[in-house]
Amino acid sequence: MNLRVLLQTSLLVLSLLPTLVLAADRVGDFSLLDQNGYFHQMSWYDDNKAIVLLVQATGDTAVQNVLADFDSLNSSFDTQGIEFFMINPLGLKDRDAVKAEMAALDIDVPVLMDDARLISEALDIDKIGEVLVYNPKSFSVLFRGPLGAELTTALTDIVAGRDLQTTQVASTGTPVSYPIKTAHLQQVPSYEKEIGPIIAQNCAACHREGGIAPFALDSHTMVMGWSQMIREVLMTKRMPPGQIDSHIGDFINDMVLADEDAQKIVHWIEAGSPKDGSTDPLTELVWPETEWAFGEPDYIVEIPEQSIPATGVLDYYNVMVELDLEEDRWVRASQYIPGDHTVLHHTLHSLIAPGETRGGSLLGGEPDRPDIAPYIPGQAPRMEPPNTGGLLKAGTRIAMQMHYTTTGKESVDASRIGLWFYPKGFVPEERMSGQCACHFTPTWVNIPPLDPDYEMTQSFTIEKDAKLFAFTPHMHFRGKRMRFYAEYPDGTSEELINIANYNYNWQLAYTYREPKSVPAGTIITATGAFDNSEQNKMNPDANRSVPWGLQSRDEMFFGAADWKYVDQSGN
């Protein structure tokens, strides 16, 4: 038996074991956005003794009548290790209505919006107005019932470390039903026609032989073997990676799995991950033989090999790359392929034109400057908008700044950059302009020790009519979220994107499906937050006052927008 068959067999056996866990009252960890678009993962609150969840529905009179008592209970217990939330199980995606109702009632408790309704199903919520007490360490429900003396007694016992005398009390309220789950119980989603294609579209590009993911989802056996892991990462929004708040903007790479697809996958897993049909859509996937996104490049930049030691904190490597172009060429696309992505964290580069001794700005903004893709975790190949590009001059050099991290074994990184040109003689009419909201050393204020939500903000003004194409956030291990806003000359404002759960490992350039037009004088503001608390499992040192710095143990705040000016015709 070869290793792959052995792995598949082992996963098939192991996949049956977590089913026993699901049969108990353990809900599992989960994550949701609240009505204001802020991300909450229950395990982050495991320094609390319990989490209280009031089941909320907009316009429900019974809930409105008890909100004052709920808020009072919050005031009584919030300093005793009890965290308070509400949860909306209806999946209506009507945040504005929830925000308006909370504001009218002067209630400042986050309402977790369960758009896909999977969390409410797992919590077995069946009535509006009931209260659940959840343990963020064991991920289980400790108490279920109405607001009242029994709930207060339960919370008092939890604070005191005593066993609960009562764990469930009958309650009344508007019933909550789950018609999609009921339908899926009657007719389990088809692996052949539904689940396999969803995995193929959303997961398989990374989860395949030779992909960047740690295991392949290339057959029903493999999906079934990893099914409980798949359920967990969907419930916590850990996968797909880099996903943003789908309520804000429309981006081609938002990485958000549609609610109906998430429901199908989770309900299929809970039904035992059955296989149907005579074909397996995942075994039939065929991947391009080339690693280049747009076919073989017109020119490949070979970056000199860099030797990486097994251990230690490394200063940035500075490498000069000589290009041997015979003539000037207009660049339309580029792609960075790392030689060893396990050690290369990111790169920055500056183009030094012939006859110059220094490179241009790393942030762009120069006429005709080509936009050549650096390496950033999770970043995709870069294709310029139609009829847009920059001129790469013969004799240009690239000054590379390369950030490496050690992995416990020596490595050699031999990276490459692929370039695709416009046809000779063709001159694109448009140029991209880059601008950003950045905190560098002159304006940096150190992040205080143990601060779980330290905000920074910076703004820039777009001086002419322009089209916005993409946003890229950059922070280090303490980065928590970043949101971009536009303030227009007429006094109105708009949120442009909400990276609600920033991940240092997935710094994507979130690209509009259709470029967004903004008038001259628009102010773009990036507001980000850092989690320098001990609850941040990636935090190198929560007791440190964190300065700006190049190394990941320090921090940066960089919110970039890609845009170009337009002429009076809108081009």
Image (spheres, helix red, strand yellow):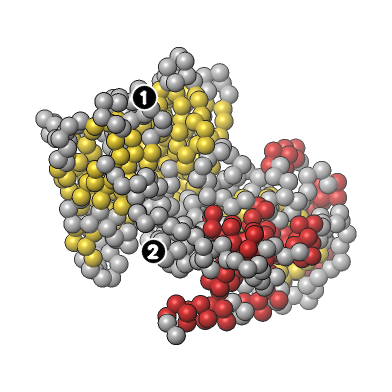
Q: Horizontal and vertical percent for residue 456?
A: 44, 41
Q: Residues within 10 Å of mark 1 (few under 14, many from 20)?
A: some
Image quadrant assignment for residue 309: bottom left
Q: Secondary structure at mark 1?
A: loop
Rendered position, 221 above or below 397: below
- The earlier-in-sequence mark between 1 and 2 is 2
Q: Residues within 10 Å of mark 2 (few under 14, many from 20)?
A: few
| Numbered marks: total | 2
Rendered position, 187 above or below 13: above
Q: Nearer the viewer, residue 149 or 551?
A: 551
Please state which amino acid type lies under the numbered disc 2: Gly
Q: Is residue 334 left or right of residue 141?
A: left
Task: State the residue at coordinates (52%, 23%).
Answer: 488
Q: Nearer the viewer, residue 68 or 193?
A: 193
Rendered position, 303 above or below 185: above
Q: Secondary structure at mark 2?
A: loop
Any mark on residue 430, and which? 1
Cβ atoms at labels 1 and 2 below 8 Å apart: no
Q: Horizontal and vertical percent for residue 89?
A: 74, 54
User: If the image is split into quadrants, where does the C terminus sit?
Assistant: top left
Task: State the residue at coordinates (46%, 59%).
Answer: 286
Please state which amino acid type lies under the numbered disc 1: Glu
Q: Horizontal and vertical percent for residue 8?
A: 51, 77
Any mark on residue 210, and which? 2
Q: Is residue 262 visible?
A: yes
User: If the image is split into quadrants, where does the N terminus sit?
Assistant: bottom left
Task: State the residue at coordinates (22%, 36%).
Answer: 351
Q: Horizontal and vertical percent for residue 406?
A: 28, 64
Alpha-carbon distance for marks 1 and 2?
37 Å
